Amino acid sequence: MSRFKCIGILTSGGDAPGMNAAIRAVTRSAIYNGMRVKGIYRGYKGLITREIEEFFNQNVSNIIQRGGTILKTARCLEFKTPEGRKFAYERLQEEGIDALVTIGGDGTLTGARIFAQEFNFPIVGLPGTIDNDLYGTDTTIGYDTALNTIMECVDRIRDTATSHDRLFFIEVMGRDAGFLALNGAVAAGAEAALIPEISLEKDQLAEMIENGFRKSKNSSIVLVAESEVTGGAMGVAERVKKEYPQFDVRVSILGHLQRGGSPTAQDRILATRMGVAAIEALLEDQRNVMIGLQNNQIVYVPFSKAIKNDKPINRDLLNTLQVSSI
Ligand code: ADP
């Protein structure tokens, strides 16, 4: 029997498809193990505004296939202050919540880490972000769905790009990480990916054009990670218009449609495995860890490691992309 009587669960930061599948798995696994569950709405904000509700099995019925998060999400500035966190801690005590499962990205885990240390409070985190930019896990909840959405969008844009002999720059999300752009480019058969990890080292655009990447083609598609380093699709297109006016350039920014949609099988399975693992971790007295997946095995990654380290992209894939798109 667990020493925890009641766990709280919240989703915070950017939403990602599969968060609902994770909420479902955490709730059911906690109840299965004899704990009560309280859903906290709008991330850390719900702790301040007391938007907290007891969850039973039926609260999480029929949500595994739904995008977004039934618990909603929000940014919470108060939680970044010691007073705000103290207030949040008092609400947890009032509610009888003795452990937390937080689902979100880098910021969410950073908040969890600070709070856990300040109040010696047990927290387990799940990596929920389409960006796949958390260290210590091969993939994050929502990433596969976003990648598939990007692939479908690029397929559609390719139809029109081909008809008009155009060069398309398609901007995808990823904050400062190139996972979506690089893997999306490989999956959709794009000609190139401009990603911050590489743009920091060299002028990817100049190199790409000087290497005559379009020699035998009329139309081309290049995925660009949204980032100050790459300049985003708009920045890149402006540059091309000035420096290489021979190209008929167009831009498409995929934007928020990348966040939505029903999660893929892979994301549902990942979220369910991680949700169950979060409760197992608490039962094993693990705390202040993020659940990760490495080589298809569940692992516990200390918050400090997950947050501090930059996850490296797979550089072999750049070569794969180049070779497969000549
Ligand atoms: P994500 O989790 O997707 O990276 P954010 O960076 O917006 O999203 O973080 C989500 C929330 O986590 C913030 O609104 C805030 O409540 C909390 N948070 C982020 N950074 C900190 C921090 N340094 N200290 C305390 N709380 C934080």
Image (tube, rainbow, N blue to C red):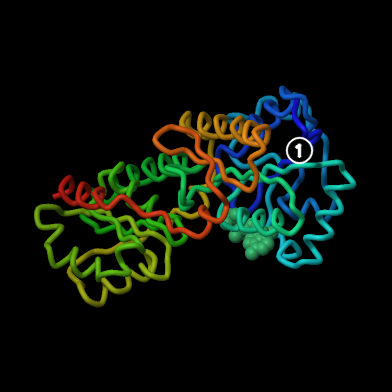
Quadrant of residue 203 within the rendered picture:
bottom left
Q: Amino acid at mark 1?
A: Ile
Query: Above or below — where is 252 with respect to 130?
Result: below
Q: Position of residue 99 (x, y in %)?
A: 74, 42
Q: Which residue is mark 1?
A: 7
Name the residue: 86% across, 51% down. 91
Q: Pick out the residue farthest to the top.
A: 32
Name the residue: 86% across, 41% down. 96
Q: Pick out the residue farthest to the bottom.
A: 242
Query: Above or below — where is 29 with respect to 212?
Result: above
Circle 1 Cα neighbour tier, 10 Å, few/some/many (<14 / 14–19 / ≥20): many
Work out whether residue 82 or residue 284 is closer to the camera in this orientation and state it: 284
Quadrant of residue 311 within the rendered picture:
bottom left
Q: Secondary structure at mark 1?
A: strand
Work out whether residue 152 or residue 265 is closer to the camera in this orientation and state it: 265
Quadrant of residue 210 within the rendered picture:
bottom left
Query: Above or below — where is 73 with respect to 268?
Result: below
Q: Is 304 situated left or right of 113 in this image?
A: left
Q: Is 38 situated left or right of 321 in this image?
A: right
Query: Above or below — where is 237 with respect to 101?
Result: below
Q: Position of residue 206 (x, y in %)?
A: 20, 70
Q: Is 202 situated left or right of 146 in this image?
A: left
